[in-house]
Image (spheres, grey):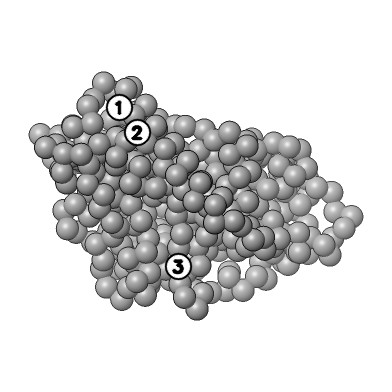
Amino acid sequence: MSELYIGLMSGTSLDGIDAGLVDFSDDQCRVVDFHYLPFSESLKQQIRHLSQPEQPILLADYGSMDTRLGRLFAETVIALLKKTALSAESINAIGSHGLTVFHAPQSRFPFSLQIGDPNIIAETTGITTVADLRRRDIAAQGQGAPLVPAFHQSFFSRHKENFCVVNIGGIANITVINKDCVLGFDTGPGNTLMDYWIRKNLNQSHDRNGDWARSGTVNPLLLAQFKNDPYFQLAPAKSTGKEYFSSFWLEHKINQFPELPSEDIQATLCQLTADTITDDISQYAADAQETLICGGGCHNHHLVQLIAENLQHSVSSTGDYGINPDHVEAVAFAWLARQTLLNQPGNLYKATGANAPAILGGIYPGKKGLSGKG
């Protein structure tokens, strides 16, 4: 008997919505199909506006985007089901990450805010939806992020031991797995600053293959200025977001280098991402035998090459172990939905810093009850 779940993910790179249909039957994890809905440039700009810490936003804009994204998430699920010719009744549940507009786990009143109304997803698709997955961990004194290490441990440790998984989205995070412990945290910026800089200078959404960064020269003084940020000195548990590593952060840092060519700044940003990932691997996973890469950053060939050059062990793709690197996060949120419906914890609390394991998220029943099957 199949155990079908759908995971929905829209990350800090703001490229679009990933939807993965996953079969967990027989204690396996098999991706049945996948669908991607890209965001329009207009929509990306509107979402970015909601995530700028130095700018005020209107509640009307926030509420409207919450509804709009809820509809888009639901449309993505329906498109995925059409591709597979499966009915909504055959799906146990949807796990929806939503889209993070602000992540502040270390503020006086800690919070992490995702939008994409799950009521609309459940009502439109008829499928039970598990969402708002970060805030229960924060309520347990955790960071609410990263949540994927628990899935990394569950799936990849079947194939490997003593290794790392690095997810490079807008923000990069690492999972360290060995026989003694499992550790996970955000290392710092992944693609977010590079995406901003190429968008500003070349009007391109991202640095394809890292070619623009490769054309520049790393500036060691600017790199040191970047790496001097206090976040990189923090010990885990820690998490961050694009509201911290923002355009304001970057512009403030580069003001001291007014004559530096824009391609050199891009090269230095790429080196920053590579160095902060590998510095943490060297510190917290010195005995790791392999690093697996996933997330959009795996397509930045220059970045992956820099990471490999910094490490003394092999670097490969999660695709070598059964999950396309573009699909890992969506699959993880399908798994988290299953954990919640099974009344099982979804956080790796030693990674997030929570005081205990927690069953994550709110459950929004589908039209035929919690099982989604009638």
The reply to whether discs 3 and 1 touch (Cβ–Cβ < 8 Å) is no
The reply to whether discs 1 and 2 touch (Cβ–Cβ < 8 Å) is yes
* Displayed quadrant of residue 86: top left
Amino acid type assigned to the residue bearing label 1 in the image: Leu
In the rendered view of the protein, which quadrant contains the N terminus? top left
Compared with 333, 359 (above or below) is below
Name the residue at the right extreme: 259
Rendering coords of residue 172 (x, y %): 52, 55
Residue at label 2? 77
| Residue 368 as seen in the image, left or right of residue 259 | left
**Earlier sequence position, callout 3 versus callout 1:** 1
Query: Which residue is at a point 71% across and 60% down the rendered structure image?
Result: 248
Residue 206 in sight here: yes
Where residue 175 is drawn, which disc sits there? none
**Earlier sequence position, callout 3 versus callout 2:** 2
| Residue 322 as seen in the image, left or right of residue 28 | right
Where residue 111 is drawn, which disc sits there? 3
Where residue 81 is drawn, which disc sits there? 1
Rendering coords of residue 233 (x, y %): 57, 74
